[in-house]
Amino acid sequence: AQSVTQLDSHVSVSEGTPVLLRCNYSSSYSPSLFWYVQHPNKGLQLLLKYTSAATLVKGINGFEAEFKKSETSFHLTKPSAHMSDAAEYFCVVRVGGTYKYIFGTGTRLKVLA
Amino acid sequence: DTGVSQNPRHKITKRGQNVTFRCDPISEHNRLYWYRQTLGQGPEFLTYFQNEAQLEKSRLLSDRFSAERPKGSFSTLEIQRTEQGDSAMYLCASRPGRTPQETQYFGPGTRLLVL
């Protein structure tokens, strides 16, 4: 069965410091992996998608994620946090051969001034 | 703004009542998804439509839950005989067919409270 595990429910960083949000996946197939962001009172928005064309994926707002098959990880990073990055982030996997998407439990990112 | 819209935004009902939610996807998006999100959790997939055809349905969608997309445009999600455990945010998302990024565009959700 395919699944994703977000290792931290809350992450706090200072503005201007790097961000690391961790996600491990479980998949029998070559997975389709995504990161979505949910700002307060706003709809979920796609940050990036792993397509197997490249292990390092660049997304919007300076975020990127690296697919590591040996570690079954797809961690999300950003070199320098901005106050506007404060939100809930979800790692997502599409179940192979289906139209079903499985979301992780989310990581709430807090950015301190 | 022609994003995904959902109505109502909030619904309070008593246990045992039926409720219906509506989702209007972005125009010309032929794919539509319903999710349920409870507090502190990520969205849980409920069902998927491609045009008017319901192609995928979660086990979470019990006999009390039903969804329709009669003309391949808007969709409705009905919950019959609501239970307190149905209290959640119900999210709708749409996307155009065959896009590499598979970007789903989410609506603001309908928050349901069952008393």
Image (spheres, helix red, strand yellow):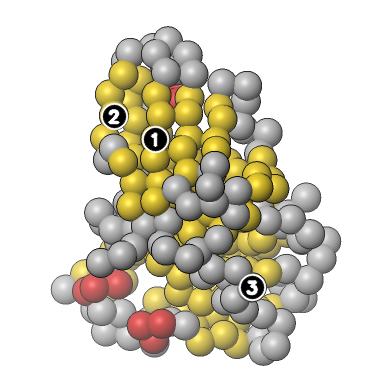
Mark nearer the N terminus (1 vs 3) = 1
The answer to whether residue A51 shows anywhere in this view is: yes
**Mark 1 lies on residue:** B21
Mark nearer the N terminus (2 vs 3) = 2
What amino acid is found at the position of numbered circle 2 in the picture? Answer: Lys
Of labels 2 and 3, the one closer to you: 3
Badge 1: chain ID: B
Residue B63: x %, y % from top left: 63, 21
Badge 3: chain ID: B
Q: Are marks 1 and 3 on the same chain?
A: yes
Cα distance between the residues tagged 2 and 1 = 9 Å
Quadrant in which the C terminus of chain B is drawn: top left
Q: In this view, does A61 lie to the left or right of B83?
A: left
Residue B32: x %, y % from top left: 53, 54
Per the image, label 3 sits on a secondary structure element best described as: loop
Residue B88: x %, y % from top left: 40, 34
Quadrant in which the N terminus of chain B is drawn: bottom left
Q: Which numbered dot is residue B98?
A: 3
**Mark 2 lies on residue:** B11
Badge 2: chain ID: B
Total number of numbered discs in the rendering? 3
Please name the residue shown 16% across and 73% down the image: A113
Please name the residue shown 73% across and 68% down the image: A31
